[in-house]
Structures are given as C-alpha cells and as structure tokens.
C-alpha cells in the first residue's frame, strides 16, 4: 500500500458538531416568507376507476388557496408509468395510498383539514397482491404493457447488466420484463449430483426505515424558474426528472440538496416534480412534508421476491448445478433488480451448469425503489441457505464447503463477465478462527453466510480551490449520506499536503456543482474520491509551478512543509501556500488562479464482499430468537477512515437483522396496508442488535483512491442468511420466509420434528 500520513486514521466526521448540537438544517426546517403548505389526499382503494372528485368542501376551508387534481396537472394522454413522473392519479388509482389530490393552504392546519374533506368516488376494479397470481392470464391488469417505461433509477445505482432478455410480449401484461442466464447442462449437473437441495424462499417488501420523511420545498421566480430544496441522494438525477416532467429546460431548475436524514436508496425523486408544479401554479413557495403513515403508503420500498432454488453437489464438495427462478414484486411501477439477484444466485460459487431466470411483475402495491444493495439480500438469503443445506447433507463443514467452491478473480459470472479482483476468499479466511472455535450452548446455533456487491461506477468531477490563507475548498456534486465528505477532505489533505482541518468540503447545488451521480451503489468514495485526488494533485502541481517561478528553482527540487513550499534542503528559500494563492488571485497578477479540476470515469468495478457468522439461541417452545453475537468480516479495499467504515458495517448488519427477524410490509387481499405506522411496522431496537465484531479485510483495489472500495452495500447482504443458517443449526429446521418471526420458526420446528 502507498505510504500515507492521514489515510488509514480514524477521525471524527466533519459534520458531527452541528448534528450533535442540533444545528443541522433539514428541508422541513425551511419556511421562506409566503410559503404555502401542501397536504395530500390519498386513495382508499388499491385498484379503482376515479368516477368523480368533489373539492368544494375542501376549498371552503379558510386559508385554502387551491385544490389540485390529476386532471389539472395532466389533462390528457396516458398516465405515466414511472413513480417520479406520476404526480397525481387522474383516471384510476392503482395502489392504496396513491396521491389523488393535493391541497395548498396558508397553514398546516388548514391544509390537513381540507385534504380530509376532498371526496373521491371510485368504481372498484380487481386487486392483485401476490406476484405469482399477477402472472396469471386472468389477473387484473394494472397497466397495459405498451405503456411501460424504463426505470431510470436502476442506472443511478450503477448495477451490472447483461443476460438474455426474454420476450415478455407473449406473457400477461403484468409481467413487464424478464432476463435469463444459462450455461452448460443443468439436468446433467443434477444427474451427477449426490445431493440435490430444492427450496422456495419468499422475502417481503421492506421499508428503508429512514428517520426523516420525504420533504421538498419549491420556490419559483418571476421568470418561471424553480429552486427546489429537497432531501435527495442524487441532485442531478432529481433535476433531470423534474425538468422533463414539468417541460422545463434543465437550467430552469436548480436542485439544492439538503441534509438527508437517512436514505439507504429510498430518496432519489419522489415529490420534486409535484411540488415544483404547485409552485409554478401558485407563483409562491410550496412545501410538502410526508407524514410517517404516508411514507409507508406511497414511498418506494424494497421489492418483495419469490425465489425457487435447486442446487446439486457431489460428495467431493463440487457444486454441479444451480437452477433459479426469481419473481420480483415491483408494485405498480417498473424497478425491481432481477439482474442483480440472478448474478448473486449464480455468481458466488463456481458452477459449470446454470439456468437462472428472473421476472419483474406488477402488483397493486406502491412502486418499489432501491434499498441498500438492491436485489442482493433477497438472492443471498436463498442461495446461502441452499449451499449451507447441501454442505451439511454431504457432511462438509459449511465454511470449508464454501472455500471449496467460491469464485475467484477471473472466474466467469453468470453473464460470462470474469470476476475482477476481489476479496471473497479472504473474508472467509478472516472468520475461519472464530468459526472453528465456536461453542454452542443448549438450543444455540451458529450460521455462516457470504454476501457481495458487484460495485458501482459512474463518471464524476470535483474541484479544489486554494485560498489566500492557504486553506483548501473542495467543491462536490455528490450528496453526503454516510460521511463521505469527511473522506473527501482526508483524500484532498493527504494528496495536497495540508492538515485535514485546513480543508473545507462544499456540496454545491446543480447550478454550481461539478457532476456526480447518485449517492448509492457503493460508488461515491470509489469514483468521486478519484476525482478529488486528481483535483488536489492538479492544484498542488499549479502551486509548485508558481513557487518554482518565484523561488527560481525547478519544481522537482521543491517540497511542501508546514504550509510552505521550500527548496529541498534550503528551508530559508520558501514561500507560503497562501502567498502563492494570493499571487494568482490579485489585481495585476501574472499567474492563473490555483484551481484544480479532477475528473473520473473509472470502468473497472471493485466488488465488495462480506462474510458473517451469526450466533443465536432459539426457544424451541415458542420459536423466539435471541441474537447472541455477529462477526462481520468485510473486504473494504483500504479503510481510508476505519471508524467510518466500521460504522457502515455496524449499520448494515443492523438493517440485515431487520430483514431477518422483524420487517415486512403486510397487505390484505384488498391491497390495504396492515402495518403502515411505526407502532405496527417492526424495526429492530437497540436491545435487539447484539454485539457486532468487525474484521476489516484489505484487498486493495487497483483503481480506487488509495486502494479503497465502496463499503456501504455489502454488510447488509449476508446477515439474514447467516441468521437463518444459525437457526437451522440450533433447531434442525429451515425457515425460508422473511421475516423469520417466532410463529414461523415454531411452525418450521414442528414440521421438522
């Protein structure tokens, strides 16, 4: 590894003081003079024609300025097939909680009162909730296939593509896309196997669980331009979608990315086009903040899935065949990550015979979005249980069986793209000692699982300005949701050669910021970090060029020490960095301003892998699970700030525990949510998160800054599978449905007895 003085040290987040003191400003805190408050009227049917909307009672409420319906915003044409562009339902509602009308008022109280008075008449249509039922020819059609659009948000997460596209035109309208990966002969592979494991797994739709609800404020100007303050993970994507939806040029829309109070992939574009339209309509600032119940009703949760897996293996430990059939429940809009799930099913392990097919299916549920490693937790829950069961049936140690079969760099993925450099084997080796020393008490068990993310890529840029006091200002377009600005300050300081407290990182708005993609897909440090390093190198080069001219020395004979550039070995011949900047930014100056521009368009992915061991105790009488501990080893490339990296791993494991034991949106047969509040939707509380032992594995990336890889996605991926395998170890029973609640575990135990 490159020798460094700052990189590799744990330093506090640069935004910690204002957050600890409660000084951070969120979108909901902003109320410019003249701001109107918007509140939604949402659908009370999951699938129905709108036969009438009576807004008279709402308009009569004192303080109400306007009541807007779908026909006001989109008088004709087909209703959009993307959630971000579907501002209000017009002709029919397709999920319970879909916005139907919006009240704009002078106060929150007036808006809320009036929104409840909007009367909507419905003609009910058939409702389909189960994606398997939605695939049937006689299922109610949510939207004709000809109206389907492309889910652009998948590109924002920079997931890999590939595979054979399956023609879905011959399939029912609710099946909107399908993809297949295959190689070899799976039937021959199963014939050669000594053990064949075949199971069906289900995972529910899961809310991202962020603290801050969606909030957007739109401020118009007299020329028809919009400035939108919003909690978004991707400001340039939000600008593009908002401008396109409203028919504006992109330079007429300025997105100001506010602090994001938790996103995990769920905050890209949701309210921005609607609130922008309302601001243009009224000529006044308009603010809309969702209630917690509205978050559960109409936001973009992770998709549910049904995954059938069949796996064959020989006594010598060779996996001979993997067959997978995946159905993703996309809700009412396209967006399910079927490709990622299939690559997970057939990519972790070497296997000559694969047959994997995935479908994306519409149901009468809210359209889905990204959630930390979209598609990977679902696929991993299935394949890691199948592998574990096969190992035990063959008499193999589960860890050694995995080491026998794990893919290595150069091995083909299901899309035939070779795996790049990665630390999959290394993370398993990192937990070997803990696995070998495990000791289970009564009703206790240990489970192991791996999980990985292919890595995200996207072009980006960054700027570094040297100020006349010798400090640096780093300008970015990426949104900091995990402490990445702290890492960028460290990269700039290390590269340029100043203390980190002399670096300020600024996230500018879309008018002034250099381009960056959405903060998601574990790609910000990996991509923007490269741009920051390049910008700092360029700024340093410019500083040395000016110093060389002033000191009459060659640049290679200079060094930077304590805020000065000096001739090597002659410290008296020096010039301060601030003075160099002043010479380049003064009236009559002869030097160009010191301003480094860095760009990145890395195309080599850097997959991140995690291996986790879960230790559980299961009450056989009730099925209640007590988590006793989790060990998580993760290949992070290089831990630029170990404290931030470990924090990401702790958070990912905690969310994985939510997937495993607690979370899942529940709908009745009529499509009505049954747990749309925090009183009913179970999230893991602090006492339910056990001690987490983190082991950092560093297999440096050849492309990432200082060898770093993205770290946000991998830690959530294997947790549910590791816990499931631990439950099977403790009870002898396999639980194949998430969340693994006590009743489900007890039923599995009874079935196995």
Image: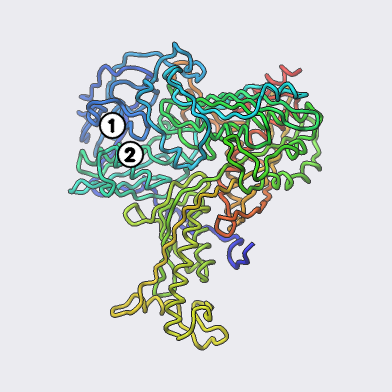
- Label 2: which secondary element: strand
Image side of residue 222 versus residue 738, left or right: left
Tell me what residue is drawn at x 71 percent, y 17 percent.
751
Taking 310 as reference, is 575 above or below it? below
| Res 399 → quadrant | top right
Q: Are marks 1 and 2 in contact (CB under 8 Å)?
A: yes
Quick one: which residue is furthest to the left in this view? 222
- Residue 207: image tag: none
Confirm whether residue 196 shows in the render. Answer: yes
Image side of residue 603 versus residue 92, left or right: right
Q: Position of residue 702 (x, y in %)?
A: 59, 55
Q: Position of residue 590 (x, y in %)?
A: 33, 79
Q: Position of residue 538 (x, y in %)?
A: 45, 67
Taking 688 as reference, is 321 above or below it? above
Q: CA distance from mark 1 to mark 2?
A: 10 Å
Tell me what residue is drawn at x 49 percent, y 77 percent.
563
Name the residue that disc number 1 marks: 102
- Label 1: which secondary element: strand
| Res 56 → quadrant | top left
Name the residue that disc number 2 marks: 288
Tell me what residue is drawn at x 33 percent, y 45 percent.
239
């Amino acid at each position: 590894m490159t020798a460094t003085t700052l990189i590799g040290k744990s330093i506090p987040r640069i935004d910690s003081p204002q957050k600890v003191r409660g000084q951070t400003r969120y979108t909901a805190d902003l109320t410019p003079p003249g701001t109107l408050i918007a509140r939604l009227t949402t659908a009370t049917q999951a699938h129905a024609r709108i036969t009438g909307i009576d807004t008279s009672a709402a308009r009569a409420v004192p303080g109400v300025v306007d009541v807007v319906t779908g026909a006001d915003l989109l008088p004709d044409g087909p209703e959009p097939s993307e959630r971000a562009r579907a501002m209000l339902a017009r002709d029919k509602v397709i999920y319970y909680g879909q916005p139907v009308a919006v009240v704009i008022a002078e106060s929150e109280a007036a808006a809320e009162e009036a929104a409840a008075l909007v009367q909507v008449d419905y003609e009910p249509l058939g409702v389909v909730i189960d994606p398997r039922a939605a695939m049937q020819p006689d299922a109610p059609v949510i939207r004709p296939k000809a109206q389907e659009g492309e889910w652009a948000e998948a590109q924002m997460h920079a997931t890999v593509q590939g595979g054979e596209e399956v023609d879905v035109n011959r399939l029912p309208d609710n099946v909107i896309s399908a993809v297949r990966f295959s190689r070899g002969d799976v039937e021959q592979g199963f014939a050669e196997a000594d053990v064949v494991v075949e199971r069906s797994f289900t995972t529910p739709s899961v809310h991202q669980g962020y603290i801050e609800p969606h909030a957007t404020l739109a401020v118009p100007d007299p020329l028809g331009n919009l400035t939108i303050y919003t909690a978004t993970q991707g400001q340039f994507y939000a600008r593009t979608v908002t401008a396109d939806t409203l028919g504006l040029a992109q330079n007429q829309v300025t997105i100001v990315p506010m602090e994001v109070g938790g996103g995990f992939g769920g905050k890209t574009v949701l309210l921005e086009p609607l609130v922008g339209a309302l601001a243009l309509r009224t000529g006044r600032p308009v603010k809309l903040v969702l209630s917690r119940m509205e978050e559960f009703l109409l936001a973009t949760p992770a998709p549910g899935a049904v995954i059938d897996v069949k796996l064959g293996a020989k006594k010598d430990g060779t996996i001979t065949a993997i067959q997978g059939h995946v159905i993703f429940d996309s809700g009412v809009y396209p967006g399910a990550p079927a490709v990622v799930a299939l690559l997970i099913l057939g990519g972790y392990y070497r296997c000559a015979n694969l047959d994997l097919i995935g479908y994306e299916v519409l149901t009468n549920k809210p359209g889905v979005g990204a959630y930390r490693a979209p598609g990977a937790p679902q696929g991993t829950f299935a394949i890691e249980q199948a592998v574990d069961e096969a190992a035990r049936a063959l008499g193999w140690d589960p860890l050694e069986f995995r080491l026998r079969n794990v893919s290595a760099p150069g091995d083909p993925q299901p899309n035939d793209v070779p795996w790049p450099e990665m630390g999959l084997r290394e993370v398993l080796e990192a937990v070997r000692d803990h696995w070998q020393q495990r000791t289970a008490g009564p009703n206790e068990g240990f489970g192991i699982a791996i999980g990985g993310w292919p890595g995200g890529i996207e072009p980006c840029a960054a700027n570094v300005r040297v100020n006349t006091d010798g400090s640096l200002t780093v300008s970015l377009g990426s949104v900091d949701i995990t402490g990445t600005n702290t890492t960028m300050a460290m990269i700039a300081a290390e590269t340029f050669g100043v203390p980190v407290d002399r670096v300020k990182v600024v996230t500018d708005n879309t008018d002034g910021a250099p381009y960056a993609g959405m903060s998601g897909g574990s790609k910000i440090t990996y991509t923007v970090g490269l741009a920051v390093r390049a910008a700092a190198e360029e700024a340093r080069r410019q500083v040395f060029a000016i110093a060389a001219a002033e000191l009459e020395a060659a640049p290679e004979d200079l060094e930077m020490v304590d805020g000065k550039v000096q001739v090597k070995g002659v410290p008296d011949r020096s010039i301060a960095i601030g003075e160099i900047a002043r010479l380049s930014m003064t009236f009559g100056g002869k030097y160009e301003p010191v301003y480094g521009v860095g760009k990145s368009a890395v195309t080599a992915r850097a997959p991140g892998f995690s291996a986790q061991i879960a230790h559980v105790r299961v009450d056989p009488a009730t099925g209640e699970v007590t988590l006793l501990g989790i060990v998580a080893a993760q290949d992070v490339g290089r831990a630029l700030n170990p404290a931030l990296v470990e924090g990401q791993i702790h958070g990912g494991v905690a969310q994985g525990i939510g997937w495993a034991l607690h979370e899942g949106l529940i709908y009745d047969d009529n499509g009505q949510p049954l747990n749309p509040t925090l009183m009913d939707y179970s999230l893991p509380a602090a006492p339910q998160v056990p001690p987490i032992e983190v082991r950092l594995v560093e297999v440096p990336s050849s492309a990432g800054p200082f060898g770093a890889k993205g770290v946000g996605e991998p830690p959530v991926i294997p947790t549910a599978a590791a816990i499931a395998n631990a439950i099977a170890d403790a009870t002898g029973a396999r639980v194949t449905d998430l969340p693994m609640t006590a009743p489900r575990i007890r039923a599995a135990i009874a079935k196995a007895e």
